[in-house]
Image (cartoon, rainbow, N blue to C red):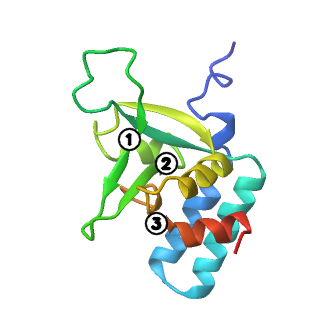
Amino acid sequence: MSTSENTTKDEGLIGNEKIEEAIAALQQEPSEELLAHALTVVRRRMREKGQVILALDMPQGQSANPTAPMQIQAVKTADGKAWWVAFTSFDEELRGGDQVKSTFLADLEQIFRTALTVPEIDGVILNPWNRTMMLDKGLIQIVLGEF
């Protein structure tokens, strides 16, 4: 295998830079038009079977038990809401330092549909350290086409 074939970019993440670019444009000039564009880009990546990197947490008090179930990492915002954390690339994940210990790739559509069924979660934060977009359940339903 040549070194050019051995890249750190997973096939499911190829194309996610479009999401990062749309979020950057929205951050630079927040508007309804750019929000709609960013949601459209996320929907397009979802339909292309795009993936994101999910961070995992060990349940509290179970670190000594290697068979304990892992949970998707959630962060709480100042308003007390809980959000799952997802990254569009390994570069975005690494921006947070060593806060992320375990990760796995997940299908965008699957993670959005699952988030809608979890009452403790208010939505999904894409790239919490840099190119950040908070998708509450209403925005997730728009991306899924369920509005």
Along the line of sight, the residue nearer the viewer: 57 or 129: 57
Q: Amino acid at mark 3?
A: Met
Name the side, left or right, on which 4 lies relative to 96.
right
> Of helix, strand and loop, which one carries label 2?
strand
* Mark 2 / mark 3, whichever is N-terminal: 2
Quick one: 94 or 71, which is closer to the camera? 71
- Is there a contact, CB below 8 Å, between mark 1 and mark 2? no
Q: Are marks 2 and 3 in contact (CB under 8 Å)?
A: no
Number of callouts = 3
Q: Residue furthest left?
A: 61
Q: Secondary structure at mark 1?
A: helix
Mark whose residue sits in front, 2 or 3: 3
- Residue 123 on image: x %, y %: 48, 61
Q: If the image is split into quadrants, where does the C terminus sit?
A: bottom right
Residue occupied by mark 2: 87
Q: Position of residue 17 (x, y in %)?
A: 60, 54
Q: Are marks 1 and 3 in contact (CB under 8 Å)?
A: no
Q: What residue is disc 1 on?
A: 94
Q: Horizontal and vertical percent for residue 60?
A: 25, 32
45 vs 20, left or right, is right
Residues at marks 2 and 3, CA–CA distance in whole angstroms: 12 Å
Residue 103 pos. (x, y %): 46, 33
**Separation of residues labelled 1 and 3 (CA atoms):** 19 Å
Q: Which residue is mark 3?
A: 134
